[in-house]
Image (spheres, rainbow, N blue to C red):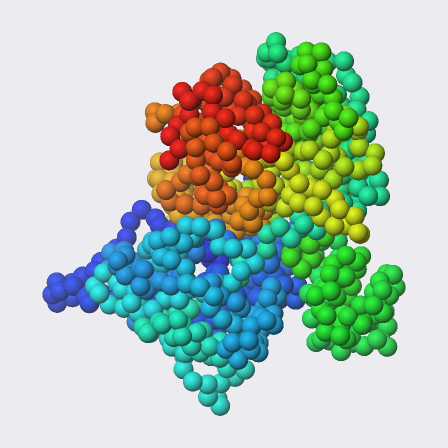
Amino acid sequence: MRLSRIATAVTLFASVTIAGCGSSNSPFDFGNDITPNEPNSVKIRFNPLTGDVSTPNNLLFNGSLDGTINLPSEAAIALTQQYQDITNVLGALDGWQTSVPFSIPLAYGDDDAEYNEEIDTKLDASSFPAGVLLYKVRASGFTDTCADVTENGGSFVAGQTCRVDEQLVYGEDYIATFSDGSLIVTPLVPFAPATSYMVAITDQLLDENGRGVAAGEAYQLLSSPITADDDATLQSLKGLTAFNNGLLAAEGVTANVSYSAVFTTQSVGSVLTTLQQIYGGMALNNLLPMSALVDTGTTAQDVANAALGTSQPGFVAAKYFKSTLAVPYYLSDLDNPDLTGADVNKWAQAKTDSPVAILQLLQTNADFADQGSATSFWAQAGAKGFDVATFGGLVAGGDTTTAGQMLAQADLAGLTYMQDGEAMPVDSHRHLTAYNPVPETKSTAFLDLDIYLPDETLTGNAMPAEGWPVVIFQHGIGSVKETAAAIAASYAAQGYAVLAMDLPYHGSRGLDLTGDGNAEISANDDPQVFANLGSFLSIRENLRQSTADLLAVRAALQAAGAPAELDGSKVHYAGQSLGAIVGVGPASVADTVNVSGFDIDYSLQSVSLSAPAGGLAGVFQYSPSFGPIVEAGLKSNPGYLALVAAGLGFEDNDTATALEQFAVYQATYPEAAQLVIDSNYPAFASIFGSLAQTVVDGVDPLNYAQSGFAMPVLVHEIVGDGSEGSGDQVIPNSLATLPLVGTEPLIASMGLEGTEVTSAGSYAVRFSQGSHSSLISPAASLAATVEMQTQFVSYAVSADAGNASVVVSDSSVIAPAQ
């Protein structure tokens, strides 16, 4: 894994103190007596006037040109690839996390010192419900102008909280804990995407000595009246603070407010809904042609034997065909791969300069707005063929929403504006956001499609006039499309075609750098090629490309030239593991979409998911299978070791770097070095995982699931029989310390109840027998595989009959519903 500057990145979420092997701190003063000192007071550590701001906080949108988080470190960024650095990565997002706990640092004593567990007092957990408050609010900013809010004055400046909508419930929506000198707020259900929240701390938050946690000096200053001596920044911050405190008072908060912060979560789904429009248009114009099916003369049995090394006699009932589909590829240029393999660390970008940046500059930069200037927006955009007349009318009429949409659809990459006589790029990084949701097509991916059709003689099924109903099957991480052969015959027996393709970097889609026909870079050899914890934006976009490909296939199935053997009006989805995870996104937007006056049907008749999960960064990091690999990689990474070296007091000097000195120490004292590496890792891993999940939140199934589903949904979870190792050993079902990681949180986010008996509707079924891969492999339990496949197939059949039902045939492999 290629991770850079880890040592500085952790300050974005919390402070991590790397400890050595001893400490001389003491709670006693042994000068003249042995009387313990008075315990240090506790206050909130916060001073926006000096840049001491914990995240999430909308103050870090200040100065943003493109609507993304504006980090101090971004000022030095010259190349977009520098957002791979986890110091900078949050600057590529259009909002904060939806599922990740956040930290509010505390300061101790008169000197605002860091926490020392030997002399400082912990917080009183019983005071958390009254002292730590969370509200859903409306806040004026890039996401929401509050134009429809008439209360509280009805006119709001950027960054101002407009109104409080509801108070979240402690213990149901969130909890608070104390850890290493900070207050940790943990959501129990995901925050809604593109939504604003206010966290407020009052003096009812107590330490274990019964003393209230006070406001820091800076917050006390911000809570004081505006004076004539205040500069513009201080006046603005005082105004925002006073307004927030007034809103809290109106909500019945009578205690003194020690701290408040507003944060807006990132968008989810805007890119997918945009792609529905794009692929719909392509399908209407024959730009998503699925090639005619080619009969290989073989069956699922042959495919299974070749790819899986085993099969069943009944697999011959599914005849094996091939097809191809060319789809837009957003990750890299497949025709000119980077021979160093660096393409795995790349990600999708918007095709045009940020509409937000353009609209802001039209208001703030005179030359950019001057229609008579040769360097204006009007001159540059007109030269690129943009309809400046229509756009100008929209801007003049105040319709910035339509104007922004028009900009997002345009090809306006590379615009500049003049600043102090120098041409500056309008948007050199082109982050994908809710405001700029159209991805740049960097190349074309030619997907090999495996398609299995029922053998009419063996199954007794005749192909309907409209073609066979279709099940899109997606495989898991490290696997290949050929695994569909293991379930194709089960569907074929009931008259269904199965279509399967490889996920990015898997199987036929590995990267062939030398042109010899062999993939030098493949997720089958190393799953971390896809789950790339060395580049968080790459993980996000690998997942998004996967869901985009599914949308493209769905659109192609109803194009005029689609294979006649496939009924594009009856499509189901089935996914296993990662295939189940990436299927949640398309399912959440599965509906009829109007494109240029024509209806494009993205609907799915049913969705069946085997062993999916949410909170994906934590899933990869704490997977019983992948977790140890991730941990070993992080512990040996130079970024983490630099933190360890600093904690031991090593510094760069004229003869050796801190890391080189630590390497000598490690060789001389291997056990002591390993002790420090191991003991400090959990705190570091928590911060690292939080950063990764914050980025992945934009495509996490937990968040897609919040929008609900228009079709029946079946989820399988492998919980085991209670014996050690009997549950899912690839994807954690749940984690006690991270309540939004695993299969259980996803089931909850989807709003599914469990069932252990035959039931009509959408449900989760928990299996006591079988393993993570039992849907396609009988190795762990033949009975579980038979039951899983029977349920998937019967679910599709009953859904097409108008009454989707989970049919439980063998209760011996089913766990209680919970």
Whether residue 293 is situated above or below residue 337 in the rendered picture: above
Residue 800, position as x, y percentages in the image? 63, 31
Residue shown at 68% from the left, 14% from the top: 460
Q: Is residue 774 left or right of residue 323?
A: left
Residue 751, position as x, y percentages in the image? 48, 44
Q: Is residue 229 left or right of residue 477?
A: left
Q: Is residue 536 left or right of residue 211?
A: right
Residue shown at 52% from the left, 45% from the top: 702
Residue 765, position as x, y percentages in the image? 46, 31
- The single residue placed furthest to the left in the displayed view is 33
Residue 314, position as x, y percentages in the image? 62, 11
Residue shown at 79% from the left, 58% from the top: 410
Quarter containing the C terminus? top left
Q: Is residue 476 visible?
A: no
Quarter containing the N terminus? top right
Q: Is residue 740 left or right of residue 354?
A: left
Residue shown at 77% from the left, 61% from the top: 406
Picture quadrant where residue 810 is located:
top left
The one nearer the camera, 756 or 733, is 756
